[in-house]
Amino acid sequence: MKKIILLFSFIYILSGQVVLAVDCVGDKACYGLDASAPASSPIRGKETDISVLAGTLIGQVLAFVGVIFFALILYGGFKWMTAQGNAKQAEEARDIMVRAALGLIIIFSAYAITAFIGDMAQNPGGIAQ
């Protein structure tokens, strides 16, 4: 089974993917890197306010934490599925998944507290937007 999965993985990686490229000539809309990169930038325009930069950084860190959480859950699930009745390995896999979930809860709680304090600092006595 592992050999079949490995074979299909190599076939997929080595096969050429179809790319539909459009030449930007005349009045045709151009959707190249020059047009799409500024639009996807986390900091658009000339916003250099420290709160915008901090919010962007926090968002990027949370996205990275989400990727790590997903990888740990996949690893724990794979380890649990391949335990084959080994109670010690199944317990280790369960611990990995529980600790990953607790870590995620702690990270999101810290983000919620930080966002609340940031909103209160920007709007003292007002309603957070």
Image (cartoon, helix red, strand yellow):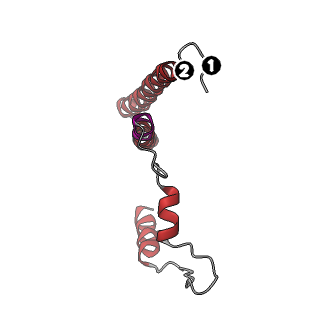
Q: Position of residue 89 (x, y in %)?
A: 36, 34
In the rendered image, is residue 75 in sight? no
Give the distance between the C-alpha atoms of the residues marked 2 and 1, in whole angstroms: 7 Å
Residue 112 picture location, percent across and down: 50, 24
Magenta highlight on residue 55: yes
Is residue 46 within the magenta segment? no
Q: Which residue is drawn at 57% across and 80% down?
A: 20
Quadrant containing the C terminus is top right
Given residues 113 and 121, the one toward you in this image is 121
Q: Give the range drawn in magenta.
A: 50-57
Which image quarter is the N terminus in?
bottom left
Residue 105, percent across and down? 47, 25
Report which quarter residue 48 is drawn in.
top left
Apparent side of residue 29 relative to residue 36 in the rendered image (left or right):
right
According to the picture, the residue beneath numbered tag 1 turns out to be 127
SS for dot 2 = loop
Q: Which amino acid does label 1 sit on?
A: Ile
Q: For residue 80, which quarter of the picture?
A: top left
Residue at 42% from the left image edge and 36% from the top image edge: 58
Q: Residue 109, which numbered label?
A: none
Q: In which quarter of the image is residue 73?
A: top left
Contact, mark 2 vs mark 1 (Cβ under 8 Å):
yes
Q: Mark 2 points at which residue?
A: 123
The residue shown at (52%, 68%) is 35
